[in-house]
Amino acid sequence: MKGAVGRIYGQASSTDFSFVVFDPREIGRTDYVKVWNDVDGWVVAQIYDVRATADLNESDALLGRDAEKEVYLAKAIVIGKRDENGLLRVPKTPFVPGENVFKADSEIITSALGLESEGAYIGMLKDSDIRVNLNINSLVQKHCCILAKTGSGKSYTSGVIVEELLERDVPLFIIDPHGEYSTMGHPNDNPEENEKMSIFKVKPKGYSNKIRLYVPPNSPFADRADGILRLDGLNLTAEEIIELTGITNPTSQALLYQAIKNLKGRNYTVEDIIAEIEEIKHNAKWGLLGHLEKILESGLLAKESTPVHVLLQNGKAVVLDMRGVPPEHQDLIVSRLCSCLFELRKQEEVPAGMIVIEEAHNFIPERGFGRAVSTHVLRTIASEGRKFGLGLMVISQRPARIDKNVISQCNTQIILRVTNPNDINAIKKGVEGLTADTVEEIKRLPPGTAMIVSPELERPVIVNVRVRKSKHGGASANIVKQKSKGKKKGKQEKEGRGEKKSLLRKMFG
Ligand SMILES: Nc1ncnc2c1ncn2[C@@H]1O[C@H](COP(=O)(O)OP(=O)(O)OP(=O)(O)O)[C@@H](O)[C@H]1O
Ligand SMILES: [Mg+2]
């Protein structure tokens, strides 16, 4: 039949069928097809396997004989069709062997998958020109995660979502350990990416009027920042101080708990804790006092702290560039700021918005993979944030090391290429609706191609993530790589590490 790409053979049910592919160049794995069903009309299915077979046994192959002709066989899983009430129906009656299989058109795919006509434009359905838009409310209020191995395009994809949210004036607070997001102020000037813009129908655009850059005290980037972020350091808990200072001695820890217990019931500063410990008659206090003095010297805490409500503002993305900040300080900063933001949000003193967390495994580690004082508040936001209009976007290259509960709380899950077996297992546990075939597909995703799983979508969809309108922070490092390929990359990475070390020294001695 004209236009058919294949024909059903063998046994077929109403949920899956096999078909002979007429021309393997026309159709392949993950493509969508449609088949006529006598009761339901046109029904959409997706190909999950294609293989070639030929009348050629081992000895034929060994002796170099050629097959008469190879045959391509595909297997497809039925997605269904929308009924008049907009509900997806899978036919009750099986497909009939001998029925022709056609390429599905955009309209029927969009309708069957439940793709939105509006929303955050993240890219196009793989190998098609069908736009994939994500529902903004679900994305922001019900949390989102981006998981992938390093270099697969997590930050790039997160930047695409940030652009879409900024265009709708959604307030964003971005925790940026590698200083990658402030470049969003500039239009994308990468020539290769600019070439692809016509395919995705986007234009270069900078968001300088919407990006606000904050840095911690002593940051070497302070001159570029819109503000310095100082924590008030009021009422630090013993756990926070232990995390900050790394005190392991049980006697020192006990003295600290005692001093803080004595101060409970009023607002206290680190100086108050020091005064309290000075009163204690115990030799272990001297080491502890040294640690507490170091907290004061770091300059992180201040009497005049940054008002936390500046972090969520309508139409703005506040980027907290934490380059060079020691991990234990980053952890405390995130914990304190997110707790304050959550409280302010509950009292409606800041607008509804989203917290974007890069390297999230450092801030909400899975049990057994380290501790972080920020874990508690981030878990709370993951489970209760949606009630109060505070969303999370968690980004991580180590899905196995990030709290699985937080991953399962994310309504929209964006997964790029992952190959590590532990990470794959973690994704299987944390992401609902993945079949063995879809998990296999994750291992094969090329860079910049994502699988998106969400209750709003009937099935996981594979998306070619669109090019960025604004400049990608990680891209500047690649300019050198382009000119001189592999060799210089290593050098540059080393220099990057060197820069980080010297920053650490500069900031915290
Ligand atoms: N959708 C895309 N379109 C074009 N290029 C892309 C896309 N996604 C990723 N890239 C390219 O891949 C590079 C790596 O992407 P990105 O910086 O987002 O990786 P990552 O997963 O965040 O890595 P890391 O774990 O190191 O942070 C980018 O610099 C960009 O050049
Ligand atoms: Mg990244």
Image (cartoon, rainbow, N blue to C red):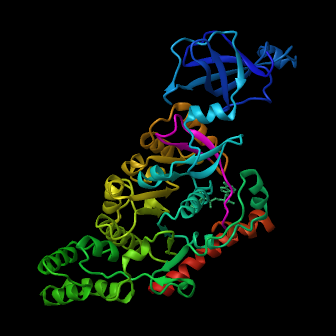
Pick out the residue farthest to the front: 84
Residue drawn at (45%, 81%) of the image: 216
The x and y percentages for residue 291 are 30, 83
The quarter of the picture where residue 95 lies is top right
Q: Is residue 379 visible?
A: no
The quarter of the picture where residue 295 lies is bottom left
Front in this rendered view, residue 81 or 342: 81
Q: In this picture, is 375 found above or below 260?
A: above
State left or right for residue 170 relative to residue 49: left
The quarter of the picture where residue 494 lies is bottom right
Q: Quadrant of ligand 2?
A: bottom right
The x and y percentages for residue 279 are 13, 89
The x and y percentages for residue 137 are 46, 52
Residue drawn at (71%, 40%) of the image: 128
Residue drawn at (36%, 48%) of the image: 405
Q: In this picture, is 468 found above or below 186?
A: above
Front in this rendered view, residue 134 or 275: 134
**Quadrant including the N terminus:** top right
Front in this rendered view, residue 104 or 303: 104
The x and y percentages for residue 419 are 57, 45
The residue range painted magenta reads 450-471
State left or right for residue 252 relative to residue 333: left
Front in this rendered view, residue 213 or 492: 213
Q: In this picture, is 412 found above or below 5?
A: below
